[in-house]
Image: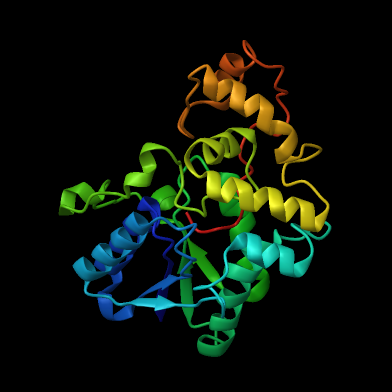
């Protein structure tokens, strides 16, 4: 039996990797990662996941999109001609993560002799139910140590002298910067901190002819975001979206809908 940790490079998945390897042994633990283009996956996330790998003595196993070194999520969706088709998973998630993940499982674990682990915590029961159901339909067992294990051995990688990614000072997750399933608060942060990705996202909207945020093009948000910026309005993804909205609405008539991030099935 092998124990596959869905190893995103985020702090939660690192804690799961440590818990699983301590319980089942490093020889039975696999750190499965989907490497993402360096333009949208911060170099400190790459530093962090490598340091945890080195600490555990378990090499990272990669299941990557064929063109991950040259293409980011914007390149993927413009090539595919859409951000999302119908009610299916976001195209970027499917191409960069889900498809390589399923290919890996089919190639190496077609006998289902494994358990798959995620970093969802006790506040993400709905995500646990969804992910467990999807994997069960495929024939795989899954487990969620941060939510379900009573006897935890570690709460922070600082306990083993590994600093979490510095991106957490702004971003809540170790997902791609410029997440195509995020809301206005995330995209305001992109506008402030990554104008290059903001421009690329606008170009993607022009090419595809559809907006990333429901009923709102980034180009239309730009004057509002510039006004917030000029007034010194800052935020992080750790600020409650309702609080940010209340502060923003004192300056601009920002609408509440689509303000909040919509969590996808990307690894935590």
Q: Quadrant of the N terminus?
A: bottom left
In the rendered view, tell whether residue 224 sits above or below residue 258: above
The image position of residue 138, as x and y in percent, is 65, 74
Name the residue nearer the viewer: 14 or 138: 14
The image position of residue 5, as x and y in percent, is 41, 67
Q: Is residue 226 left or right of residue 78?
A: left
- Residue at position x 55%, y 89% in the image: 107
Q: Is residue 148 left or right of residue 107?
A: left
The image position of residue 258, as x and y in percent, is 70, 34
Q: How is the image coloured?
A: rainbow
- Residue at position x 64%, y 60% in the image: 74
Q: Is residue 128 left or right of residue 62?
A: right
- The answer to whether one can see residue 133 in this image is no
- Residue at position x 55%, y 81% in the image: 105
**Quarter of image, res 82:** bottom right
- Residue at position x 59%, y 82% in the image: 103
Name the residue nearer the viewer: 129 or 76: 76
The image position of residue 240, as x and y in percent, is 52, 26
Q: Is residue 42 left or right of residue 217?
A: left
Name the residue nearer the viewer: 250 or 150: 250
- The answer to whether one can see residue 155 in this image is yes
Q: Residue furthest top?
A: 250
Name the residue nearer the viewer: 155 or 61: 61
Count of numbered circles in the view:
0
């Amino acid at each position: 039996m092998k124990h596959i940790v869905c190893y995103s490079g985020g702090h939660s998945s690192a804690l799961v990797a440590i818990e699983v390897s301590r319980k089942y042994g490093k020889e039975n633990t696999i750190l499965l990662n989907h490497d993402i283009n360096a333009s949208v996956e911060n170099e400190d996330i790459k530093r962090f996941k490598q340091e945890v790998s080195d600490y555990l003595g378990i090499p990272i196993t990669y299941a990557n999109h064929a063109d991950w070194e040259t293409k980011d999520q914007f390149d993927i969706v413009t090539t595919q001609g859409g951000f999302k088709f119908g009610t299916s998973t976001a195209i970027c998630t499917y191409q960069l993560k889900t498809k390589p993940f399923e290919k890996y499982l089919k190639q190496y674990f077609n006998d289902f002799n494994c358990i798959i682990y995620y970093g969802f915590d006790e506040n993400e029961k709905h995500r646990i139910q969804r992910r467990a159901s999807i994997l069960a339909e495929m024939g795989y067992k899954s487990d969620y140590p941060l939510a379900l294990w009573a006897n935890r051995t570690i709460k922070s990688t600082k306990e083993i002298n590994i600093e979490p990614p510095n991106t957490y000072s702004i971003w809540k997750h170790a997902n791609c910067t410029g997440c195509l399933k995020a809301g206005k608060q995330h995209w305001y942060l992109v506008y402030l901190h990554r104008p290059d990705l903001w421009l690329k996202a606008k170009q993607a909207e022009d090419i595809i002819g559809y907006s990333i945020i429901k009923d709102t093009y980034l180009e239309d948000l730009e004057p509002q975001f510039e006004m917030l910026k000029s007034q010194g309005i800052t935020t992080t993804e750790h600020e409650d979206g309702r609080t940010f909205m209340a502060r923003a609405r004192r300056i601009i008539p920002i609408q509440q809908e689509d303000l909040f991030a919509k969590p996808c099935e990307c690894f935590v």
